[in-house]
Image: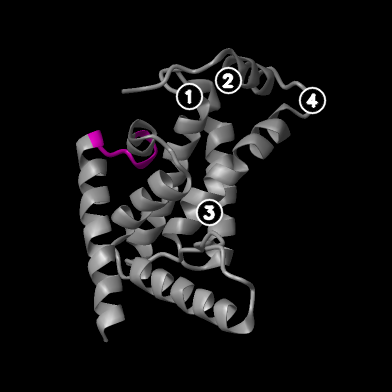
Amino acid sequence: MSVAPNEEDREMVHAVLTGQAGAFERLLRQHQRLVWLLVQRLVREPEAARELCQEVFLRVSRQLAGFRFESRLSTWIGRIATSVALRHLEKQRIDTIEFDAELHDLGHEDTPAHLLDRAQRLQRLRDAIDALPPMPRLCLTLFHLEELPIAEVAALTHLPEGTVKSHLHRGRDRLRALLENHDEA
């Protein structure tokens, strides 16, 4: 299922392609968070992630004329970002990603004991997520933390929706098992 591009996407692409002043910078600002999220979730080193984000936008600038408006512009750019990051992982043979999770305030007072407990839980969560393979980890991040619909996750990761659902299901099961095993230890 693809989401049709909106008029804003058409105007943005037209502005960039016709060389309007500041148009590419607006495109970059609008999509840099998504690109950074996708790339840094798949690539461990921050410096490599920064370089890959630059590569993504270079590719966007070179390939924008070929954008066919069959999806939203953000989806198309996200596909490029995912592809660039996965290609980097293949070259580096890296099978883990850094996950910068944030736990919501659980309503406890911010006493030193509660802050330490929350920090320990956050570290256990990060460790468990780091133990997941890259694609389940990315799917979990996009669906649960970024609250993207499954169709959008599928589009960004180049995976069929059924495969995304499978990664989500198995990833949650594996994450639950890892956290339970840690709690029992």
Q: Secondary structure at mark 1?
A: loop
Which of the 4 image quarters holds residue 149? Answer: top left
| Disc 2 to disc 4, C-alpha distance | 17 Å
Front in this rendered view, residue 93 or 137: 137
Q: Which residue, given by chain and number where applicable, does mark 4 sit on?
A: 21
Do the CB atoms of the residues marked 2 and 4 lie less than 8 Å apart?
no
Label 1 or label 3, whichever comes before in sequence order:
3
Q: Nearer the viewer, residue 63 or 161?
A: 161
Give the CA separation, mark 1 to mark 3: 22 Å
Which residue is the site of mark 1? 72
Classify 10 Å Cα crowding around label 2: few (below 14), some (14-19), many (20 and above): some
- Residue at horizontal 31%, vertical 70%? 131
Residue 40 coordinates in the image, percent (x, y): 50, 57
Kind of residue at badge 1? Arg
Residue 14 shown left or right of residue 82 in the figure: right
Q: Magenta residues?
A: 155-161
Of labels 2 and 1, earlier in sequence is 2
Q: Amino acid at mark 3?
A: Leu
Residue furthest top as drawn: 7
Helix, strand or loop under label 3: helix
